[in-house]
Image (cartoon, helix red, strand yellow):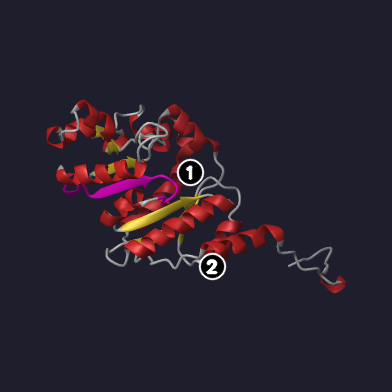
């Protein structure tokens, strides 16, 4: 199976754990070619990573100038002109955590599924809701579905569950707070590469394999009905301001010992 991962974030570190270094970006390459797109070849922008995964980084303009979303849109356009989309069985677009303009939403035009990665926090779920809104909008004209939500490195999922109750969508997996996930990024290695030498990490890899199995099974997915901003603000705020209280048991229900 041929896999391509495309990093769509100005930080250009999406593929760092696959390649072990920050690969040159599309912007870097275009600058070298004096922005002559016709002089760019696949080998100029595609780098081989761990497990044979091919890697591309869009990059972005210098901080405080230009438009990162425009760069993402141009990256998609360039890869399409290079016929890169026809060469792979699986293409992953890793897009930064919020849809702030049409450029960052451009990968959705070429996607079968969207997976939202979030934590159990207030702001992250706001961003998740904006992505859900983008999927709903794109699904009007494209065969795009939301595969589901992934909780990332969180010790709790109560706020995620509150959101999913209001905006129904599958929860593909919830990754607990595992320090090795953070360490893998520092080492510039995937958890799977680390597990080759440290078999004890196999249980962490199983979380990711579970997600992969669900996506490769080509689920039906959903068209999300995102919440309005004020409605979501009230919902998530209420969770903190009025936390649910455990029911008070009467004396008859308070057992000191139970034997079954």
Give the x, y percent position of residue 246.
75, 64
Q: Which residues are magenta?
A: 85-100
59 and 55: which one is in front? 59
Crowd class of label 2 (few under 14; some 14 to 19; many from 20; radius 10 Å): some
The reply to whether residue 176 is visible in this rendering is: yes
Residue furthest front as drawn: 65
Dot 1 lies on which element?
helix
Residue 97 is covered by the magenta coloring: yes
Residue 166: which disc? 2
Residue 140 versus residue 74 in the image, above or below: below
Crowd class of label 1 (few under 14; some 14 to 19; many from 20; radius 10 Å): few
Give the x, y percent position of residue 151.
50, 52
Residue at horizontal 45 percent and vertical 41 percent from the top: 202
Residue 92 is covered by the magenta coloring: yes
In this view, the mark in front (2 or 1): 2
Residue at horizontal 44 percent and vertical 43 percent from the top: 205
The reply to whether residue 83 is visible in this rendering is: no
Residue 14: which disc? none
Give the x, y percent position of residue 23.
31, 29
């Amino acid at each position: 199976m041929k896999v391509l991962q495309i990093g769509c974030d100005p930080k250009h570190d999406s593929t760092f754990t696959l390649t072990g270094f920050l690969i040159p970006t599309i912007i870097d390459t275009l600058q070298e070619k004096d922005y002559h797109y016709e002089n760019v070849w696949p080998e100029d922008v595609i780098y081989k990573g761990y497990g044979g995964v091919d890697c591309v980084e869009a990059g972005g303009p210098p901080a405080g100038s230009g438009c990162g979303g425009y760069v993402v849109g141009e990256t998609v356009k360039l890869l399409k002109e290079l016929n890169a989309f026809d060469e792979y069985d699986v293409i992953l677009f890793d897009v930064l955590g919020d849809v702030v303009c049409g450029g960052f939403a451009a990968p959705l035009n070429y996607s079968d599924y969207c997976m939202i990665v979030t934590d159990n926090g207030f702001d992250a779920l706001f961003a998740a809701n904006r992505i859900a809104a983008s999927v709903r909008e794109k699904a009007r004209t494209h065969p795009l579905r939301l595969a589901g939500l992934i909780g990332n490195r969180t010790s709790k999922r109560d706020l995620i569950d509150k959101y999913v109750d209001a905006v129904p969508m599958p929860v593909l997996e919830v990754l607990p707070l595992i320090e090795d996930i953070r360490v893998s990024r520092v080492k510039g290695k995937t958890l799977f590469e680390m597990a080759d030498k440290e078999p004890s990490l196999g249980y962490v890899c199983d979380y990711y394999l579970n997600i992969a199995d669900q996506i490769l099974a080509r689920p039906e997915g959903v068209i999300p009905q995102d919440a309005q901003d004020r409605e979501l603000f009230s919902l998530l705020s209420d969770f903190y301001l009025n936390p649910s209280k455990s029911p008070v048991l009467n004396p008859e229900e308070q057992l000191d010992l139970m034997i079954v």
